[in-house]
Amino acid sequence: MTPAIPAEDVSGSPLTMTFDVACSVEHAFATWTQRIGSWWPRDHTVTRAHDTDVVLQPGEGGRIYERASDGTEHLWGHVTLWQPPHRLSYRWHLGRNPADATEVDIDRELRSRYDKLHDRMLGTRGYRGIRQPTR
Amino acid sequence: MAETVGDPFEALSDPNRRDILRLLSTGDKPVAEIAAAMPISRPAVSRHLRLLKDAGMVAERAAGTRRIYHLREQGLAGVHNYLEGVWGLAAARFRLLAENTVENAAGGTPAAPHHPEDLR
C-alpha cells in the first residue's frame, strides 16, 4: 500500500515506519487515537511533565492538544482525515510554530501469516521543505 | 566528522533558513547569490548561514574572495535519524499499550486505566 504523501511534502524527506501490532485493527486505531496520551513520549511534549495529557479529538477537524495538570492547553494540530479503523491523517506542530507543521499519515493493511491475522500500521511523516541532497 | 554545536531543529525552525536550505539543495552557491534570491538583507543571510553552519547543516569553502556554501548531508541525515528515533520510541510504546490492553466486544475501546506508568 502506498502511503499518501501530501503534495506540499513532495520536496520534503518523509519518514516511513512500518510495524506489526498483535491486535485487531479496531483496537489499534482506538489505542492510537483515544490513548495517545498514554503512549506518546512525554519528552516530546511542551511541558515534558509526567502528568501532562494528550488529546486527539475524533473526526476531521478534531483538535490535537496537550493538557497540563493545571488545565493549560497547548494546541498541537488537527485531524485531516478520519476513516476508522483504516486511515488517519493529521497535521501537527507539537506546540511549536504552526508553519513548521508535519503530516502524519496512518495506514494499515491486513495480511495473513501462519493463519493468524496481524494488523500493520504504516505511518508516514514528513517535515516540510527539506530535501535530502541527491548527491 | 566536524564538531557541531548548534541544534538542527533550531536551525530548521526559521522559514528563511529553510528557504536557504532549499536553495542550496539545487546547487552550491556563493553568499551573494543566496542573498540575491532572498527577501532579507545580506547581513541577515550571513547570520542565518552561520547558524546553519553551527548546526552542521551547511559548510563553506573559499573560492578566491568568495565563500561558496553547500549542504552537508550528515547534518540533514542527523535530523532524519533523530525523528526516526522519536517515532521509534513512540511506536514501541504504542505497540506495548495496544498489545497489553483488553479489547472490549463493542469495537475496541480500551478498557485499561489511563496513563499506565509501567509503560515508561
Image (spheres, coloured by chain):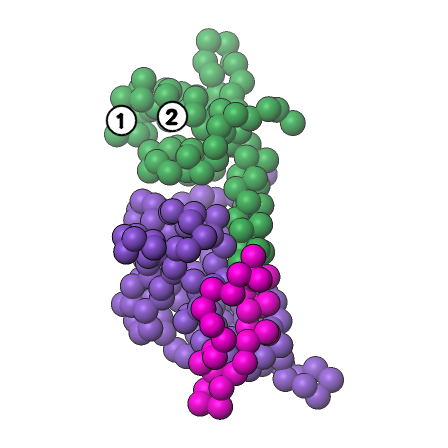
Chain colours: A purple, B green
Where residue A88 sits in the image (x, y, percent)?
A: 41, 71
Q: Earlier in the sequence, mark 1 or mark 2?
A: 1
- SS of the residue under disc 1: loop
Which class describes the residues within 10 Å of circle 1: few (<14), some (14-19), or many (20+)? few
Alpha carbon separation for disc pair 1 and 2 = 10 Å
Same chain for the residues at labels 1 and 2, yes or no?
Answer: yes
Nearest the eye: A58 or B79 = A58
Q: Does the magenta stretch include residue B82?
A: no
What range is drawn magenta here?
Answer: B91-120
Q: Which residue is drawn at the image coordinates 47% and 79% (left, top)?
A: B111
Q: What residue type is labelled 2?
A: His
Give the quadrant of the N terminus of chain B. top right
* Figure check: A3 above or below A29: above
Disc on res. B48: 2
Q: Looking at the magenta stretch, what is its main secondary structure? A: loop
**Image side of residue A57 versus residue A106, left or right:** left
B110 in the magenta segment? yes
Q: Mark 2 lies on which chain?
A: B
Q: In which quarter of the image is the C terminus of chain B?
A: bottom right
Which x, y percent locates residue A85?
45, 79
Q: How crowded is mark 2: few (under 14 residues within 10 Å), some or many (20 or more)?
A: some
Is B97 situated left or right of B46 in this image? right
Q: Which mark is residue B40?
A: 1
Question: Which residue sits furthest bottom?
Answer: B105
Does dot 2 land on a helix, a strand or a loop? helix
